[in-house]
Image: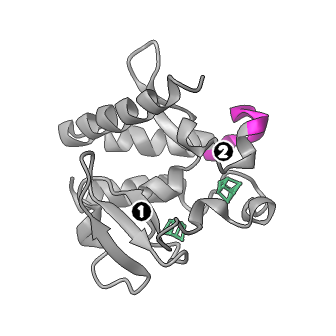
Amino acid sequence: MDRDILERAYAAIGALTPMRTDCGALCGAACCGTDSDGQGGVHLFPGEEALLQGQDWVTGIAPDALAPIMLCASRCDRETRPLGCRIFPLTPVRGRNGRWTVRLDARARAMCPLLASGIGGLDPDFVKAVRAALRIVAETPEGDAFLEKWHALEDAYRKPLW
Ligand code: SF4
Ligand code: SF4
């Protein structure tokens, strides 16, 4: 996916975060925490791997069926962090009209205290911005296909739970 699309998607979200206050204070920034192997990870959108070259907080890129997974040092430069981090704890889903919208990501359930309040508990500007960013991604066939795969993965995780 072109750098231009990614940069427009990043800009659509800008500095917005799930809450107007620092939600990391609620949970010790659980979504940036380390796994049992000592690292955190997020799937990269198409084209993001190239944008992360040279970032010293990227500790590795691991192959995965959906997309490469970026491993980080549980810290990053907010300006260059991947889209998967910027949209969390939301995930793409198609609305009845066929356009991409968002819902809470079932994979966040184990760690994110914000899920208890539902999507209405998030900053509405953040929700709108993430929706807009995902629609920018979907402007390209590659981006749209990637959202389908991302959604399928999240949906498969959700079904046994909800
Ligand atoms: S886990 Fe949820 S509440 Fe905690 S920092 Fe991440 S988005 Fe915010
Ligand atoms: S890249 Fe940044 S926002 Fe994403 S998991 Fe790592 S520390 Fe958290």
Quick check: can you spot residue 105? no
Camera-side mark, 2 or 1? 1
Quick check: can you spot residue 45? yes
Percent coordinates x, y for residue 31 in the rendering: 60, 59
* Picture quadrant where residue 6 is located: bottom left
Closest to the observer, 10 or 69: 69
Identify residue for label 1. Answer: 82
Which amino acid type is shown beneath numbered disc 1? Pro
Answer few, some or many: residues within 10 Å of disc 1's Cα (few below 14, many 20 plus, some between 14 and 19). Answer: many
CA separation in Å, label 2 and label 1: 19 Å
In the image, residue 70 lies in the stretch drawn in magenta:
no
Identified at 47% across, 41% down, the residue is 132
Q: Which mark is residue 52?
A: none
Is 69 situated left or right of 104 in this image?
left
The numbered mark, 2 or 1, whose residue comes first in the sequence reads 1
Give the main secondary structure, helix, strand or loop, of the magenta stretch: helix
Closest to the observer, 83 or 154: 154
Q: Which mark is residue 125?
A: 2
Which amino acid type is shown beneath numbered disc 2? Asp
Answer few, some or many: residues within 10 Å of disc 2's Cα (few below 14, many 20 plus, some between 14 and 19). Answer: some
Mark 1 secondary-structure assignment: loop
In the image, residue 118 lies in the stretch drawn in magenta:
yes
Magenta segment range?
116-126
